Image (spheres, rainbow, N blue to C red):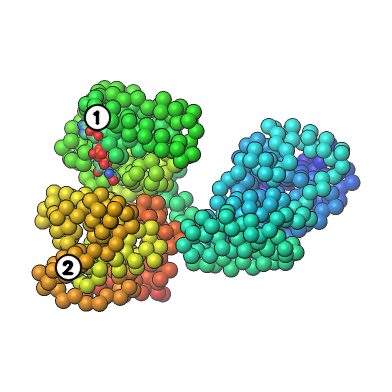
Amino acid sequence: MTDLISTHTHGALGIIRMTRGPVNALGHALRVAISQAHRTFESDPAIAAIVLTGQGRFFSAGADITEFDSGRRAPFLTDLIAQLEASTKPVIALVNGIAYGGGFELALGCHGLAALSDAKVAFPEITLGNIPGAGGTQKLPRLIGGPAALDIILSGKPISAKRAHDLGIAQSIDGTEAEALTRIEADLADGPPQRLPRDLTVEGSPEDLSEVAAPYLRRARGAPAPAKALEGVQMAYDTPLDAGLAWERETFTALNTSPEAKALRHVFFAEREARKIEDVPPQTPKRALASAGVIGAGTMGAGIAKCLADAGLSVTVIEQEQDRLDQGLARIRAIYDEAQSKGRLSKADAEARLARISGSTSMDALCEADIVVEAVFEAMDIKRSVFAALDKICKPGAILATNTSTLDVNEIAAATSRPEDVIGLHFFSPAHIMKLLEVVRADKTAPDVIATAMALGPRLGKVPVLVGVCDGFAGNRMFINFNREAQILIEEGALPWQIDAVLSDWGLAMGPLAVMDLAGLDVGYRIRQARGPQSPYPFTTADRLAEAGHLGQKTGRGWYLYPDGARRGQPDPEVETLIKAVSQEKGITRREISDEEILHRCLWQLVNTGYQIIEEGIAQRPSDLDVIFVNGYGFPKTRGGPMFFAEQTGLARVAADVRRFHAEIGAHWTPSALLLEQAETADA
Ligand code: NAI
């Protein structure tokens, strides 16, 4: 017995229970422990069969990902699986809870697979840029056929016990371990299980796979793992198992060191790290949240109300006038209707969640709310009056949150007598879809309010990142500088379609100019007009376009032309003429700008601003900024985020570029002291 496993007997069954908290990751020590326990039971004459199971929510979440970068040691998982397959006594996997990746492969290496009703199996490797590496691509097709196996491998998504049973992965489902053991004993009495996946052959032809593979390959945008998964499953049809396993092993190892896999692992760990707050330890008490208020049921408020109701909170939505309230509630219903029509939610679930949402035109209805999220117009005087009213109405201990994207949360908090309860919850649009939640800590926000807000994030299906108060917080402050650089490049000689092509080839979902067209050029225009002279200067062309009614997709022309409601824009010769006229007016001699210069100037603006933000204590660590960009700004996870990309490029090189841009282009390239310092350390 170790803290990794426990063993006991149940009649003639020898039970090996994995007990390595928190998720039974199959690290070296656990592999050794299982191997030894199996040998012990195998040589025990009183034991007829061996049952391998887990505890709590986990059978096993799979490989210990930390070993991917620190190096793995024998016995490898494949060795352990080979040992179980060669066992002289049958081994039954009793899958309780989650069996993912290597955990699922371990179960597929057993002579039988029994599931408890809360079991879930999945191959999430694809989400980390890889394929299953311990038999998954070869054995699952043998067990359930090529197309179904490929879909599981390419989607990375969990399969419920029931579906696993329907597909033929699990032979039985029971409610409790005791019931499952009784069934296993009874089945053994009828004879040993005959179904080792390695001994089966795949029916059908590899051609059957193309329909399943096509959409995944399209979305892969050149990332290598999905194509390799397809190749592996194709091999399962006609290649002897051991040759298939050798190919899989080699491919897994090669993909593991691919830049995409490294970047995806970085994002995985970065999201976990983002939850850690230096001065708010994990044991900080959290406030209970059962009921919520949302003030303003516009674009953002409607989506926020849905997130809260989905998480099980009762939600009261406030608008000042009845017709606005009716429109807001209709907006929420429309979001649920859309989720239903896309098959994401059943009618019954949608109705149950909608039933948790009520509306009122009086803020007094918020007197019992545990948390209130304000999403009214972006104007300081309105926000302050809302918070002053909340201060009078809300019960002591209620969390008062603002969804402001640009305003000073300290100033909003100062409108109350309880600034310690005030925090920013900056959702991104559309609020019910975008994963990012910037949790904005103001000067006086209490630690338990921060801890509660960070814990609320995952409940809402969001990835929370803590930031501090400054103009634009972390994400928008960086993003505006990125956009500003694109504008400067346009004035210097680049064209919008060149910039968008460079950045989307690099991996962005959309280039910055196409994004402006989608959001509407009037949005930024209004903000710049409101800010007056302190507004960023090089948006002249964008402003001229907005003034001429070129507002983007909605008016059929912006930076691009969108004939007949097209969603993809075409280059517009008139815009090119306007751009050239603006350069001339400003006395700029246009020049040829290389794709590399475009890429680095846009990305290093993000990076330099990112280091400034960390220097100022607005964000805690570079990886938090990566989490922000991949979850809130359409940055490709396969690049790991801007800060990771800079580290991979070499901070010394980035710092040298930034210094050069500073000398050649202007003061907005003043290098961050922290970037220079990090570049030196990285160099040493
Ligand atoms: P919106 O104009 O769509 O909705 C605002 C709603 O608030 C309207 O329905 C209005 O009737 C209501 N309202 C105004 N004053 C009110 C009051 N005193 N009491 C009750 N209801 C009131 O605006 P949107 O886009 O939803 O923005 C709301 C907030 O979210 C703003 O602070 C904005 O900066 C922020 N935000 C917006 C994002 C976006 O992309 N639209 C992204 C992130 C944050």
Tell me the quarter of the picture where residue 572 sits.
bottom left
Residue type marked 1: Arg
Q: Nearer the viewer, residue 102 or 74?
A: 102
Residue 482 located left or right of residue 312 = left
Percent from the top left, x then y, of residue 679?
A: 36, 70
In this rendering, the answer to whether 180 lies above or below 249 is above
N-terminal of the two: label 1 or label 2?
A: 1
In this rendering, the answer to whether 110 lies above or below 461 is below
Residue 84 visible somewhere in the drawing: no
Disc 1 to disc 2: CB gap under 8 Å: no
Q: Is mark 1 within 8 Å of ligand 1?
A: yes
Residue 29 located left or right of residue 213 = right
Quadrant holding the C terminus: bottom left
> Residue shown at 46%/62% (left/top)?
221
Residue 387: which numbered mark, if any? none
> Residue shown at 25%/70% (left/top)?
494
Residue 527 located left or right of residue 501 = left
Q: CA distance from mark 1 to mark 2?
A: 43 Å
Percent from the top left, x then y, of residue 180?
A: 74, 35
Q: Residue furthest front?
A: 564
Regarding mark 1 in the picture, which secondary structure is present there?
helix
Residue located beneath label 1 in the image? 324
Residue 610 located left or right of residue 108 = left
Q: Is mark 2 within 8 Å of ligand 1?
A: no
Q: Nearer the viewer, residue 476 or 570?
A: 570
Percent from the top left, x then y, of residue 216?
A: 52, 56
> Residue shown at 79%/33% (left/top)?
182
Residue type marked 2: Thr
Residue located beneath label 2 in the image? 577
Q: Residues within 10 Å of mark 1 (few under 14, many from 20)?
A: some
Q: Residues within 10 Å of mark 2 (few under 14, many from 20)?
A: few
> Residue shown at 46%/56% (left/top)?
267
